[in-house]
Image (tube, rainbow, N blue to C red):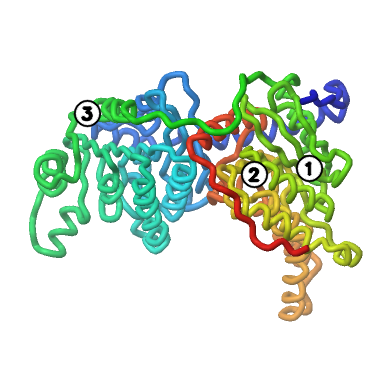
Amino acid sequence: MRRIQTAIDPNAPVFRENAQRTRAVVADFKALQERVRHERPQRDIERLRRQNKLLVRERLDLLLDPGTPFLELSSIAAYDQFNGEAPGANVISGIGVVSGREVMIHADDSSNKGGAWYPLSAPKIVRALEIAIDNRLPVVHLCDSAGGYLEDLSGVYVMGGRVFRHQCILSKLGVPQVAVVLGHCTAGGAYVPALCEHTIMVRGSGAVFLGGPPLVKAATGEEVTVEALGGADMHTTVSGTADYAVDSEAEGIALARELVAGLAQPRKHFDWADAEPPYYDPRELYGILPVDYKVQFDMREVIARMVDGSRFQEYQPGYGPTLVCGWARLWGCKVGILGNNGVLFSDSSLKAAHFIQLCNQIGTPMIFLQNTTGYMIGRTYEERGITKDGAKMLMAQAGSAVPKFTVVTSGAFGAGYYGMCGRSWDPRLIFSWPQARMGVMGPEQAGNTLADVKLRQLRRERPDASDEEVAELRRRTREKSERETSALWFSARVQDDGVLDPVDTRNALGIALSCAANAPIAEPRYGVFRM
């Protein structure tokens, strides 16, 4: 593979301006992330201390191998919803290393509302378990939840059942799960530890029951204590629901580490070689990326700062130039890369479909770097077959069997988001960069269209509406469009797996590739390509 020859001048004014603006956007995101991760009311922290409980991130520190990376997923989930009552959706999920083994971790955050599951909690857990299923990752559950949020149980009910279904699928696949019951597991939440191969309970604080003492009394008239109804000693000596009773959280987490250490190490798939850093400095990404999604940049410059040695074997470099395709190595793993350099035309769509098939033929995972306004529209392009050529790209996507990973680097709009393996097209993991935008159309087009519709309604209802009212309506619709196409908005609703600092993307993809290598690759099977 040849090294990419950069055309970037770090001393150019446009580079310095991009770097300054992009660093500011990244800094704002990181400040938000820190607030979601760590800011909690002091009264809730004191409550946990009185209960002899650790904070959730203190539990993670005990569970994870020291000095190893933890790839947290959907870190800002729900940050702008539920009046700020459920930061991170009251759940931490992510991929970490425990006793030398890659695992998926689901940890309830009881520092707010007792760790109650809000409407976005279950989708976040479901997504973590989907990733575990796809990548054959053992799961460690750190259970401490008050159950479903009582003021919106309908928002938890259906997806909550999906959590338990995914646990059953993991067991069916032979992928073990370990639960450490650190607090109450009530109602449906009781099934989380019950569906695990190994369950540990902490005496005095851990409890598992379908209905707690107040509900039991209301339903049956029976009066019973928490310990008698669902405590650690009862479940490990009488019901058999749990396997081990321990006297402290630290002891329970240490035992979980021992159990994970006893799991068999999987055989890794894919083509691996010795890793090497990029030749070009990844921090130069800040200067390459424009904050304005409408400003184009060369995706090769991004690839050069992510892949090993900045080397890239480009496929069909002279054909379909608005899509860059080729092979590289990332942390030693051979990957196929598809990156947008503009709108998708028929030639770039056909190039993508063929390249996807080639990667499947040789069992090479793919990375999609999104930056596109979508597929080209217009009479001439329809006559040339853009719709059916785009459909070929989608068909190749659906038939692909190798792992796929997606990074939304800038703009991702229309069906181009689908063709480049958006969230609905089953990437193993999908991340966004903080300045990225995505949606059916760009925020300006969406805002103007919505404003025109609302303006016609206003004129029908109030023909004498003032110019100030019209201007205010347009301002509100534009702000709504800007807000609801942002990467932060999508990530807060668990529509991706998290927002990344661009410089951290290489490491995140390295972890993702290592995890994906745990699972065997099926044979691709394609549907009918309209020729």
Residue that label 1 marks: 292
Q: Quadrant of residue 334?
A: top right
Identified by mark 3, the residue type is Ser
Q: Residues within 10 Å of mark 1 (few under 14, many from 20)?
A: some
Q: Quadrant of the C terminus?
A: bottom right
Q: Nearer the viewer, residue 393 or 104?
A: 393
Residue name at image x 33 percent, y 40 percent = 177
Residue at 42% of width from left, 61% of height from top? 155
Estimate the spatial distance between the alpha carbons at disc 2 and disc 3, rounded to whole Å.
Answer: 49 Å
Q: Quarter of the image holding residue 180?
A: top left
Q: Quadrant of the N terminus?
A: top right
**Element type at mark 3:** loop
> Does dot 1 land on a helix, a strand or a loop?
loop
Which residue is most to the right?
380
First in residue order: circle 1 vs circle 2: 1
Alpha carbon separation for disc pair 1 and 2: 35 Å
Residue topped by disc 3: 248
CB under 8 Å between discs 3 and 1: no
Indicate the position of residue 311 as horizontal and vertical percent values: 75, 25
Pointer 3 or 1: first along the chain: 3
The residue that disc 2 covers is: 360
Give the residue type at disc 2.
Asn
Pair 2/3: label in front? 2
